[in-house]
């Protein structure tokens, strides 16, 4: 069940013992503080629990210009290109790669397609532009696995849910620290409580599927010989 921002604000006021304090405003102070604490918690959970807890999947079209816009994006996890019934993973381009030709090429399972990002870092608030090399001779579908950024909270009636809701006390404690700082009150106990909450989050970040061991990705095979099996080199 989602929790309203106003509910979090009321809890912050009680935690900071500022229930009737007019110096700290709900809309001007506590709302942006909650938004910032929510973003901090979301990114902590992404880092601690791993990407699959927050991963989304979408499909977009790469035009014959070799570019596509997606977003907003916090972390890009994987891009796959579909050829008939097969999905072939793409690789990011390094500056040392000598494949910067803009010649239009018909993509197939043996095409070593690379990509890189364009833009000014607006991927968390707007579109993330991706350029592909070589560019396709015709429109091509690409499947994208990514983590979206945290929702932007702008209203007292906004709500938070999902995995973040389970740790919403982190937001309350962090908001109470900021509120007490504004009224020049001691925050040492709250700082310790926040540190303890963070350690609890980290300690509980065990795999959800506890019955199956984690595995190691074969990075060398994926990056050094990405299309070997498609081309029939044995």
Image (cartoon, rainbow, N blue to C red):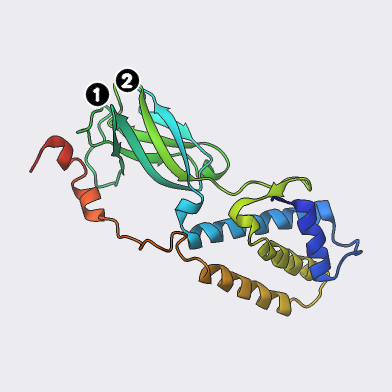
- Residue plotted at (27% across, 23% down): 104
SS for tag 1?
Answer: loop
Residue 138 in the image: state x and y as whole percent: 32, 20
- Residue plotted at (61% across, 60% down): 41
The picture quadrant where one finds residue 82 is top left
Q: Is residue 161 above or below residue 112?
A: below
- Residue plotted at (7% across, 43% down): 234
**Residue at the outermost front position:** 211
Mark 2 highlights which residue?
138
Q: Is residue 65 left or right of residue 188?
A: left
Q: Is residue 80 left or right of residue 162?
A: left
Q: Is residue 120 left or right of residue 234?
A: right
Q: Which of the pair 228/72 is nearer the observer? A: 228
Residue 43 in the image: state x and y as whole percent: 55, 57
Q: Residues within 10 Å of mark 2 (few under 14, many from 20)?
A: some
Mark 1 highlights which residue?
106
Q: Is residue 26 above or below residue 194?
A: above
| 3D distance between C-alphas at marks 2 and 1 | 7 Å
Residue 46 in the image: state x and y as whole percent: 51, 57
Say if mark 2 contacts mark 1, CB within 8 Å: yes
């Amino acid at each position: 069940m989602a929790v309203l921002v106003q509910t979090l604000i009321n809890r912050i006021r009680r935690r900071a013992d500022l229930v009737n304090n007019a110096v700290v405003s709900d809309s001007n102070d506590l709302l942006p503080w909650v938004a910032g604490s929510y973003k901090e918690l979301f990114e902590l959970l992404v880092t601690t629990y791993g990407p699959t807890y927050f991963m989304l999947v979408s499909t977009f079209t790469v035009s014959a210009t070799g570019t596509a816009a997606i977003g907003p994006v916090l972390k890009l996890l994987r891009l796959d290109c579909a050829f008939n019934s097969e999905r072939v993973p793409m690789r990011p381009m390094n500056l040392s790669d000598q494949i910067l030709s803009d010649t239009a090429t018909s993509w197939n399972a043996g095409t070593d397609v690379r990509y890189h990002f364009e833009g000014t870092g607006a991927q968390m608030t707007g579109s993330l532009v991706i350029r592909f090399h070589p560019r396709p001779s015709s429109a091509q579908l690409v499947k994208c696995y990514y983590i979206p950024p945290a929702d932007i909270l702008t209203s007292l009636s906004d709500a938070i849910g999902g995995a973040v809701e389970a740790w919403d006390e982190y937001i309350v404690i962090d908001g109470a620290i900021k509120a007490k700082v504004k009224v020049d009150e001691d925050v040492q106990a709250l700082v310790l409580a926040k540190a303890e909450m963070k350690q609890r989050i980290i300690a509980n970040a065990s795999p959800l599927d506890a019955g199956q061991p984690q595995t190691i990705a074969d990075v060398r095979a994926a990056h050094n010989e990405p299309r070997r099996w498609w081309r029939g080199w044995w």
